[in-house]
Image (cartoon, helix red, strand yellow):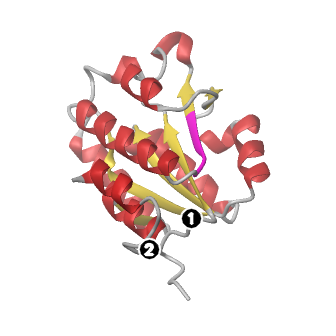
């Protein structure tokens, strides 16, 4: 029986939080966050797992970064929101309930605002939250570090994109192993 803090492909969903064009010049590691997120999306899609994307007030902050939009399959689920927490969006929360999965894997920006509040609301609702620490960012390093620490102290399981993808496969004999391995190597 796997440890409850490891990911299970039968229960996992990726939630990409607010990686929008307005942040491109404001967040020092924006390009890295985007590239790591694209890898996560590609891996989840290869494994046939759901990917949800949120946008915070897109009229003011722009749409999701183009690189991410180009990486998602047709019919990608994008949820506009005004609340900082994605779980504050009835559509997003409703879709999670419909999926019936208990592990929510988060990446996005900003670490200390929307990602942090989403993580806390998900935990309060009974979800297991896994954070891809190499695919989150904030305008200031201090805010990012504070957000990471607060989430860890609240029970968020920290991970990386590569760690998460290999946990989801569990075995080098997995039918998609070579495809997923090529994404991270």
Give residue 105's position: percent from left, percent from top. 50, 55
Q: Is residue 83 left or right of residue 6?
A: right
Look at 64% across and 28% down and name the residue there: 75
Secondary structure at badge 1 equals: loop
Give residue 24's position: percent from left, percent from top. 30, 22
Give residue 45's position: percent from left, percent from top. 51, 45
Look at 44% across and 74% down and name the residue there: 170
User: Which residue occupies the extreme bottom position in the image?
Assistant: 1
- Give 124 or 55, whichever is nearer the viewer: 55
Look at 47% across and 74% down and name the residue there: 6
Q: Is residue 157 left or right of residue 49?
A: left
Query: Is 92 drawn above or below residue 47 in the view shown?
Result: above
Q: Counting residues from the N terminus, which is met first, the one under dot 2 or under dot 1?
A: 1
Secondary structure mainly formed by the magenta segment = strand
Look at 50% across and 32% down and name the residue there: 72
- State yes or no: residue 171 in magenta: no
User: Which residue occupies the extreme top position in the image?
Assistant: 59
- The magenta stretch is 49-53
Mark 2 lies on residue: 170
> What is the quadrant of residue 104 in the picture?
bottom right
Mark 1 lies on residue: 9
> What is the quadrant of residue 101 in the picture?
bottom right
Q: Are marks 2 and 1 in contact (CB under 8 Å)?
A: yes
- Disc number placed over residue 128 in the picture, else none: none
- Give 144 or 24, whichever is nearer the viewer: 24
Give residue 171's position: percent from left, percent from top. 41, 75
Query: Is 153 drawn above or below residue 26 in the view shown?
Result: below
Locate the N terminus by quadrant: bottom right
* Distance (Cα) linking label 2 and label 1: 9 Å
């Amino acid at each position: 029986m796997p440890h409850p803090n490891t990911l299970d492909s039968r229960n996992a969903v990726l939630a990409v939080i607010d990686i929008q064009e307005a942040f491109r010049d404001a967040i020092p590691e924006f390009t890295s966050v985007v590239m790591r997120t694209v890898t996560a999306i590609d891996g989840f899609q290869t494994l046939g797992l759901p990917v949800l994307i949120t946008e915070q007030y897109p009229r003011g902050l722009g749409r999701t970064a183009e690189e991410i939009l180009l990486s998602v399959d047709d019919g990608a689920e994008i949820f506009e929101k005004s609340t900082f927490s994605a779980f504050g969006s009835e559509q997003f929360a409703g879709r999670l309930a419909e999926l019936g999965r208990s592990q929510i894997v988060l990446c996005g920006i900003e670490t200390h605002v929307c990602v942090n509040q989403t993580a806390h609301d998900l935990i309060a609702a009974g979800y297991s939250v896994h954070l891809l620490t190499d695919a989150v960012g904030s305008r200031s390093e201090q805010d990012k570090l504070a957000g990471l620490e607060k989430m860890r102290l609240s029970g968020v399981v920290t991970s990386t994109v590569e760690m998460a993808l290999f946990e989801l496969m569990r075995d080098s004999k997995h039918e998609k192993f070579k495809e997923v391995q090529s994404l991270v190597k």
